[in-house]
Image (cartoon, helix red, strand yellow):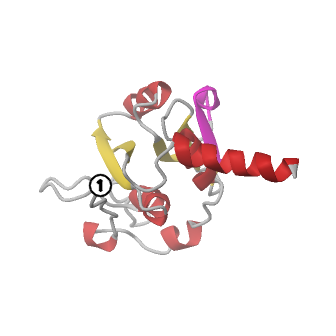
């Protein structure tokens, strides 16, 4: 009985400490990283204002769309800028990270490929929700099966509330 109450309290805390119904925006950040030698796109921000696209974008959308969360991706000049924003919690999640330096001091790293990790800022207001979602994340095959060379290949959840 005690275990059931604890599980219910944890679940309620997850719901109340974050907005599981998609009213908040999950923020990410990345640098321009167009096609590589294997002919797939990691992150590309079109100059015509269309949404970014690439494997990194699909990694994020796989999580946010599954839980009907809106995603905002900020283009940065350097990965250091994104890491700084992860430290202070103004960026919630980063894909395609390598586990190095002091990153585990300010983010949870969930490995999803040989050397790649999904990073979640421990200072994010969405930390509890994203942590839960990250550990249910197992979509590498789908993400790696496409080259992601145009924005129309992605499906973006749009919160209508």
Side of 13 where 161 appears, left or right: left
Quick one: 3 or 76, which is closer to the camera? Answer: 3
Q: Which residues are magenta?
A: 100-110
At a point 48% along the width and 43% down the height, the residue shown is 93
Residue 160 vertical position relative to residue 75 in the rendered view, above or below: below
From this viewpoint, which residue is outermost toward the right? Answer: 1
Side of 110 where 142 appears, left or right: left
**x, y percent for residue 39:** 39, 67
Residue 118 at least partly seen: no
Quick one: 83 or 10, which is closer to the camera? Answer: 10
**x, y percent for residue 35:** 34, 60
Q: Indicate whether residue 160 is drawn in magenta.
A: no
Residue 81 vertical position relative to residue 161 in the rendered view, above or below: above
At a point 29% along the width and 55% down the height, the residue shown is 44
Q: How many marks?
A: 1
**x, y percent for residue 53:** 32, 60
**x, y percent for residue 122:** 57, 32
Task: Give the residue number, with chain letter if any, for mark 1.
Answer: 44
At a point 87% along the width and 52% down the height, the residue shown is 1
Residue 28 at least partly seen: yes
Label 1 CA crowd tier, 10 Å (few <14, some 14–19, many 20+): many
At a point 30% along the width and 42% down the height, the residue shown is 74
Question: Residue 41 sits in which quadrant?
Answer: bottom left
Side of 97 where 150 appears, left or right: left
Quick one: 142 or 125, which is closer to the camera? Answer: 125
SS under mark 1 = loop
From this viewpoint, which residue is outermost toward the left? Answer: 48
Q: Quadrant of the C terminus?
A: bottom left
Q: Indicate whether residue 105 is drawn in magenta.
A: yes
């Amino acid at each position: 009985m005690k275990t059931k109450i604890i599980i219910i309290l944890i679940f309620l805390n997850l719901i109340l400490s974050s907005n599981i119904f998609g009213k908040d925006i999950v923020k990410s950040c990345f640098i321009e990283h167009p096609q590589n030698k294997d002919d797939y796109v990691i992150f590309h921000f079109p100059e015509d204002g269309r949404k970014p696209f690439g494997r990194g974008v699909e990694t994020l959308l796989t999580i946010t769309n599954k839980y009907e969360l809106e995603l905002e991706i900020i283009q940065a000049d350097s990965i250091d800028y994104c890491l700084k924003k992860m430290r202070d919690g103004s960026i919630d999640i980063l894909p395609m990270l390598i586990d190095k330096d002091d990153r585990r001091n300010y983010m949870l790293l969930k490995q999803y490929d040989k050397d790649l990790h999904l990073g979640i800022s421990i200072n994010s207001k969405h930390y509890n929700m994203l942590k839960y979602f990250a550990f249910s994340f197992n979509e590498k095959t789908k993400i790696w099966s496409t080259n992601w060379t145009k924005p129309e290949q992605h499906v973006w959840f749009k919160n209508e509330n």
